[in-house]
Image: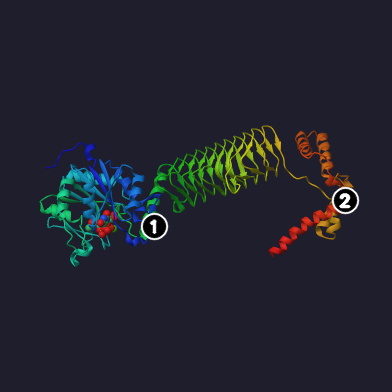
Amino acid sequence: MKELRPVSDLRPTAVIVLAAGEGTRMKSTTPKVLHTIGGRSLVAHAIRAARGTSPHHLAVVVRHERDRVAEHVSQVDPDAVVADQDDVKGTGRAVECALEALPADLSGTVVVTYGDVPLLTSETLEGLVAAHHASGSAVTVITATLDDPTGYGRVLRDETGAVAAIVEQKDADEEQRAIREVNSGLYAFDVAVLREALAEVGTDNAQGEKYLTDVIAIARGRGLAVRAHLVADLWQTEGVNDKVQLARLGAELNRRTVEQAMRDGAIVIDPATTWIDADVTIGPDTVVRPNTQIHGATTIGRDCVIGPDTTLTDVEVGDGASVVRTQAELAEIGPGATVGPFSYLRPGTRLGAKGKIGGFVETKNAVIGDGAKVPHLTYCGDATIGEGANIGAGTIFANYDGVTKGHTNVGAHSFVGSNSVVVAPRHIGDGAYVAAGSAVVSDVAPGQLAVTRAQQRNIDGWVARRRAGTKTDEAAQAALAGDAQTGDARTGDARTGAQADARARARAEARGDAEAAAEAEAALASEPGAVSPNDRLSRHAGDSAADSAIDSTTETKDAQR
Ligand code: UD1
Ligand code: CA
């Protein structure tokens, strides 16, 4: 009495995913189906495969660690019906509980799958449903022939070769245990047959459980057709029972995902050391170099270079970007931008188009504008950096005062000199400068230069007096002798840094070197009182101040020894 259905009605009425079992062999405080491979939980893989068949209803049966599993299922698929299994054990009872949670008037095909079989695809389930409809069977079961069938239910066939029953390993006799065709545990049922047969299934077996597999013999007893559907790809029906299988199936899933990425156009240099999660997308001609892990919902554009030795988790990478030896999470990297090597992008990092985050830079909650550069050795946290700005080597955005976090803005095309500390909350305007080595504790308006640098003092003859006879002294004497011969400005005359700067300016002006002149100008302007009281200190006092600075570093070194 096979009904003819339009192709669109190949949609199953319901898919029931069994996930109530305890999974003791995992030896884990995490419920088995919540363990992950390829960035998704086992049950999420199962739900995705089920959802791909567009069922009218999707139910997940839970019991062990019920609340944790139920919450996760609702997150993964808010439309899934969470069905609770009661105290009666067994796969048959699990399906019965699911049917109780679904509308009572269901008709058509119900598919049963397991929450711990992660490599199964929607296409395989669709193939099962299509075969089920085409043959007009009451039950279609996916079977496989294994070299070692130990532990599985064995498929018993009658004299005509038709499937007659499934007997569990623990209930099987020697002869039955020799059968190598096993039950994968994935089925399509006519829902009315399933309901009626389950009502007849008892628990009189080696495990005292209500076996779903008993439905097969009951259906046959009523003269209904039961057929086996063979799936050649054994990975698709393999379940996870322990952590060895978890790793094995995880590696195979990765192999498949990496292969798919290549078929979609990515260039993967070393598939063996490349790990790509199932939800990742990679554009064509993007090169993925060795030892790279791409996790979560990461999306990568076309023509990028990713790796080597890079880990991206939930990162968005624009076309043509380069991300080398980098760890990044919840970050956005704009088109044409460059990151790395040795960069650490923490959540909330957004790098604009053609921007740069260079070597040994850590960023967090940092919006870095188009074309802006943070090239070297910087901590950039809680900051907004305008387009085209340049953050010098060793800059620290001091965003935390021990109690609260503050935010810093650096305006467009501003320039923060090397080794500066910008103490948040701070606002540096567009087109502003910060001199190298400054500690910026007040805001800087557009066009201003901020400088907080201590003034430099050069103490003449110090080496000759205090390090006489050393190689350093010899080098100095030789250089000074050479200078004296050539009449160079660097003679042994007492001269302050400011005087030297003034001479440098004069020389530069004479050469028409406008840029050097401006530099010298800046140095003078930023150090008012060209001859400071410090410069008038006696040589002796200067020596002893310098000595004590040196002594203290010597002491530190001694203490460390
Ligand atoms: C089951 C089959 C066996 C088949 C094997 C394939 C039965 C009686 N046996 O055996 O023929 O070869 O799968 O892997 O069906 N589950 C529940 N509630 C329960 C018990 C199990 O939801 O009370 C779920 C588990 O979470 C798991 C699945 O059903 O996802 C299979 O359970 P498991 O205990 O692994 O079944 P097996 O004994 O391996
Ligand atoms: Ca199992």
Q: Which residue is mark 1?
A: 247
Q: Which residue is mark 2?
A: 538
Color scheme of the displayed model: rainbow
Which of the pair 48/142 is nearer the observer? 48
Residue with the most extreme front position: 403
Mark 2 or mark 1, which is nearer the start of the sequence? Answer: 1
Q: Position of residue 484 (x, y in %)?
A: 89, 48
Is 164 above or below relative to 530?
A: below
Q: Position of residue 46 (x, y in %)?
A: 32, 49
Q: Quadrant of residue 55?
A: top left
Which of the pair 442/22 is nearer the observer? 442
Label 1–label 2 contact, CB within 8 A:
no
Residue located at (35% from left, 58% from top)? 245
Does residue 391 appear in this view? Answer: yes
Q: Quadrant of residue 126?
A: top left
What element does badge 2 sit on? loop
The three-letter code of the residue at mark 1 reads Ala
Assign the N terminus to one quadrant of the image.
top left
Q: How dense is the environment of label 1, judged by Cα within 10 Å: few (below 14), some, or many (20 and up)?
A: some
Q: Position of residue 276 (x, y in %)?
A: 43, 48
Residue with the most extreme bottom position: 174
Is 105 above or below relative to 242?
A: above
Q: Is residue 51 left or right of residue 310?
A: left
Q: Is residue 33 left or right of residue 296?
A: left
The three-letter code of the residue at mark 2 reads Ser
Q: Position of residue 6 (x, y in %)?
A: 20, 36
**Count of labels in the image:** 2
Assign the C terminus to one quadrant of the image.
bottom right
